Amino acid sequence: MVFTGVLTKMQTEFLDPIQYYLVFENDFIHMNQLLNKTINIKLVGHQCLSCGLDKPIYRQGFCRTCFFDQPLAGDWIMRPELSTAHLGKEDRDLDYEKKVQLQPHIVYLANSSNVKVGVTRKSQVPTRWIDQGAHEALEIVEVPNRYLAGITEVALKEHVGDKTNWRTMLKNEIKDENLLEWRQKLKQYIPEQTQQYYIENNSETHLHFPVEQYPVKPKSLNINKTPSYSGKLIGIKGQYLIFEDNTVFNVRSNEGLVVELSV
């Protein structure tokens, strides 16, 4: 079987284990069914996720021009505290920014390589946790817009991490944490402006990933430098494909690349 298409982050289904799907324009690939099979990945071009042109991908699946023009790549995406739609102030496209920023957002704790705080739209729970490779997560604050979530995250990351160590996550060198205790410990640091949105009574979400064997020394595949790769797929975690030879491939960080995938 040969599939050709533009890489975008894998779609997921919250089951036990997580189900993964690679979606191309003309193909829909259930990646779990490819476990223990040899997969060949070949780079054949680029296609910006915005303008659709065959131009080098700069960041987040966009060419350089689109990355600095499109509202989907505004600074507030990575730094929610910079959101301004609640003030009626435009960054790049106010209609788009209102649509995304002015909806319920969750501040959460997740454990993927360590306990970290993060922000996501409520509609993206638990997808966000799956994409991060978290094996447990807990909502701690639900607010009506992205800005309030952002300032809460900024306050809490003074006392808990906000980054995932991808190598530790992929090696599964993690320990279970009591996120309920972490939530209680961090409660005092929630800004006064968002204390009313604190979530008092809920339970941890646990996630299980389809991994036959974790890599001992994961090495990241860069298909811009190694445009053709072949390996046996033995696991999927976060947005990573894990191969038998310790090679790992981050699908999301390669969005916008056109590949030929054969099995």
Image (cartoon, rainbow, N blue to C red):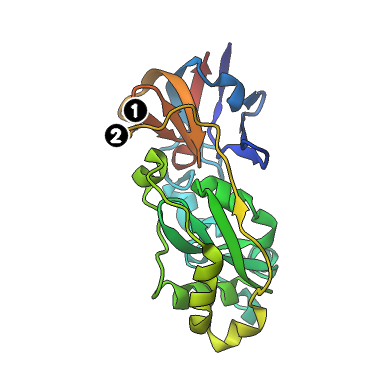
Is the residue under label 2 in contact with that under label 1 (CB below 8 Å)? Answer: yes
Q: Which residue is mark 2?
A: 217
Task: Provide residue 82's location: percent of width, then percent of height.
Answer: 50, 73
Q: Which sits earlier in the primary sequence, circle 1 or circle 2?
A: 2
Residue nearer the viewer, 26 or 153: 153
Residue nearer the viewer, 68 or 131: 131
Task: Provide residue 155's location: percent of width, then percent of height.
Answer: 46, 78
| Residue at (42, 51) in percent of width and height | 175
Left or right of residue 113, residue 12 in this image: right
* Label 1 residue SS: loop
Residue nearer the viewer, 4 or 251: 251
Q: Is residue 126 visible?
A: yes
Q: Is residue 9 above or below residue 262?
A: below
Task: Provide residue 191's location: percent of width, then percent of height.
Answer: 53, 84
* Label 2 residue SS: loop
Amino acid type at mark 2: Lys
| Residue at (68, 39) in percent of width and height | 15
Q: Residues within 10 Å of mark 2 (few under 14, many from 20)?
A: some
Amino acid type at mark 1: Asn
Label disc, if present, on residue 246 of the rendered structure: 1
